[in-house]
Every structure is written in structure tokens, then in C-alpha cells.
Image (tube, rainbow, N blue to C red):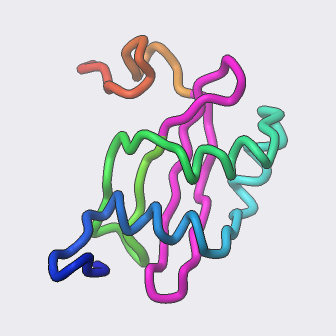
Amino acid sequence: MVENKGKPLTMNEDFRIVANRGIVVMSRHAEARRLKRRVPIDAIHRILTDFNAIEEYPDSFPLPAMLLFGMCEDTPLHIVAGFDLEQEIVYIITVYIPDSEHFEPDWITRRNN
């Protein structure tokens, strides 16, 4: 974690720093899903800098990751992304449109199935 005036930043804040000034690398899987779902690349970049964090995975391997929510026009979108704070790289792992079977109408809250 980076420090801000002596206190550590949160994972969410660390991610925002990397997303705003770092490199974005999209996995083949994420690119295939993005193309299949016709998600414009600019929507991905917009969500990376202006997102709601749904879940944080600080212990994921090989890098910490987050589940992000944002809108692509009128379509809800989830992005799973890992990030390397030191190298300032965001790795897009997958991109998908959430469904009502797994998420509440806000597209952020998981259903208790």
C-alpha cells in the first residue's frame, strides 16, 4: 500500500492511483468477452477510473484484485481486475454483464442463493 501523509491508502485508493496513471493490460479472456459483449474499450477505461468497488480480493494470487461495477451506456458492467502497485499496471481479468440471478437490481449486491 502507498502512504498518504503518513497513513496507508486503502486498496480501493491504491487501485485508483494505478488505474489513473498506469498501464492497462487486457487478458485474452477479457478481450474475447469484451468483443463478444460488444463493450467499447473506452467504456472499460472510463469504468477503471470511475467505478464502484463491489469486492476486494487482497490475497488473490499473483496480485490483489477487485470486482468493479460501472455502466456502459444503459448496460451494467462488471470488471475483475488485478493490479501491480509498484509497476503501475492494471490487469483486466474478465469483463461481464451481471445477471439478476446472482445480483440484486442495483447490480452491486450479491443475491443470497
From what the image shows, is residue 63 above or below residue 13?
A: below
Q: Quadrant of residue 111?
A: top left
From what the image shows, is residue 98 above or below residue 12?
A: above
Where does residue 27 sit, x and y in percent of width and height?
A: 69, 64
- Which of 28 and 83 lies nearest the eye of the viewer? 83
Q: Which residues are magenta?
A: 69-97
Residue at image x 60%, y 72%? 21
From what the image shows, is residue 46 above or below residue 90?
A: above
Pick the quarter of the image with the C terminus.
top left
Image position of 47 (left or right of 60)? right
Where does residue 15 sit, x and y in percent of width and height?
A: 43, 64
Where does residue 34 sit, x and y in percent of width and height?
A: 76, 43
- Which of 106 and 13 lies nearest the eye of the viewer? 13
| Name of the residue lying farthest toward the bottom | 86
Pick the quarter of the image with the N terminus.
bottom left
Is residue 71 located in the magenta-colored stretch of the structure? yes
